[in-house]
Image: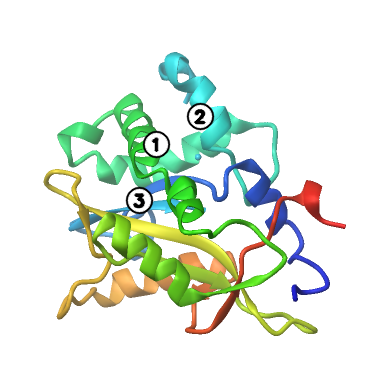
Amino acid sequence: MAPAEARGALPGWISVLGWGLALCSLCGAGPLWSGSHEWKKLILTQHWPPTVCKDLLRDMKIYWPDVIHRSSNRSQFWKHEWVKHGTCAAQVDALNSEKKYFGKSLDLYKQIDLNSVLQKFGIKPSINYYQLADFKDALTRIYGVVPKIQCLMPEQGESVQTVGQIELCFTKEDLHLRNCTEPGEQLSSRQEAWLAMEASTHGMMVCEDGPIFYPPPTKTQH
């Protein structure tokens, strides 16, 4: 059984491509990150500037929409992504320009093909619930690494968390898949604060073990 309402705008996200897309490193602009912008891994979040990316525009419009704030001004959103994440990721040669950053992000998204992987394991948007372990087991079996799955917590009148975004992480050196959290790995207090701020901004937390709702597109909602 599914919740009476599918969490506001969330089904609209799913109707686009399952999630939005972002390629992040653990750094950002502003006072929180004054000083060294050191980072160790890249995070591909499936949860997106036209003047220098003419040949990427078609794919960016399809795969890199702003799924949080509905707006026709795509270039402003992409500019925000570059300023917030790309300028830091640019420490890596493969990502050291706007075109490289957006182009590599799209390449990684297509390479991962997360939606197809989930469907191979019978996990697709549905009015029925899945278990969080279903998602983790499927992704770990295919990719050989442990992803990070975040959820929208149940609101009043709901009893089950809703999948919000899935993160797969890559090494800084060669962009190979890696566990999002390694045993014994510790983030700095500033990194933890930044991640907590990012998650809380969108009302998401790391999913708890148990049932999880993966809502169907708006057009199938009744």
Residue 141 visible somewhere in the drawing: yes
- From the image, tell me which residue sits under label 1: 110
Residue at 71% across / 55% down in the picture? 11
Label annotation for residue 60: 2
**Does dot 2 land on a helix, a strand or a loop?**
helix
- Upstream in the sequence, badge 3 or badge 2? 3
Instruction: Report how far apart the C-alphas of labels 3 and 1 lie in the structure.
Output: 17 Å
Contact, CB < 8 Å: mark 3 with mark 2?
A: no
Instruction: Report how far apart the C-alphas of labels 3 and 2 lie in the structure.
Output: 16 Å
Disc 1 residue crowd, few under 14, some 14–19, many 20+, Cα 10 Å: few
- Upstream in the sequence, badge 3 or badge 1? 3
Which percent across, then down, holds residue 85?
A: 36, 46
Which percent across, then down, holds residue 95?
A: 25, 35
**Does dot 3 land on a helix, a strand or a loop?**
strand
Q: Quadrant of residue 146?
A: bottom left
| Residue type at numbered disc 1 | Lys
